Image (cartoon, grey):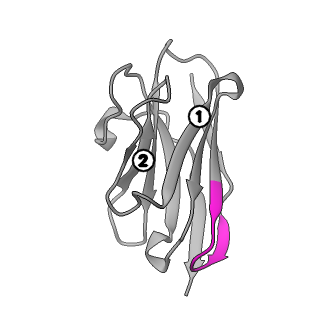
Amino acid sequence: QVQLVESGGGLVQAGGSLRLSCASSGRTSSFYAIGWFRQAPGKEREFVAAISWSGSNPDYADSVKGRFTISRDNAKSTVYLQMNSLTPEDTAVYYCAVDNWAGIPRRSRRVYENWGQGTQVTVSS
């Protein structure tokens, strides 16, 4: 069973930066994508970014494109989400999850599993 643990969240002022980490452990399929999602109070969980096993073809939601960068270090079984130019609208709990899929990263949360417990990101104005 794969377990994911997010870390790196916190309180930051608007315009600041944070780097989230998603560390995986346990048995996984040979190739898998990792997706980042976020959920703000009273809102549905939404796609943020995803990356394939090879690291190619990262995908971003329009709302974070140009500000967020997803990357992965397979040797460390860790995926990162570098978040720059943060705004109060980025405030949410951020989750990572596994998509046992070797193709181009997908956006639908229905295909993701083994969700982590989440890490809170709060951006003050």
Residue 95 in picture, x, y percent from top left: 51, 50
* Residue 16 shown in magenta: yes
Callout 2: few (<14), some (14-19), or many (20+) C-alpha neighbours within 10 Å?
A: many
The residue carrying mark 2 is 49
Q: Which residues are magenta?
A: 10-19
Residue 71 in picture, x, y percent from top left: 56, 39
Residue 8 in picture, x, y percent from top left: 68, 56
107 w.r.t. 42: above or below: above
At 59% from the left edge and 53% from the top edge, which residue is drawn? 82
Residue 48 in picture, x, y percent from top left: 40, 53
Quarter holding residue 45? bottom left
Helix, strand or loop status at disc 2: strand
Give the residue type that dot 1 points to.
Arg
In the rendered structure, the answer to whether residue 6 lies left or right of residue 31 reads right
* Numbered tag placed on residue 72 in the rendering: 1
- Residue nearest the viewer, comparing 102 with 95: 102
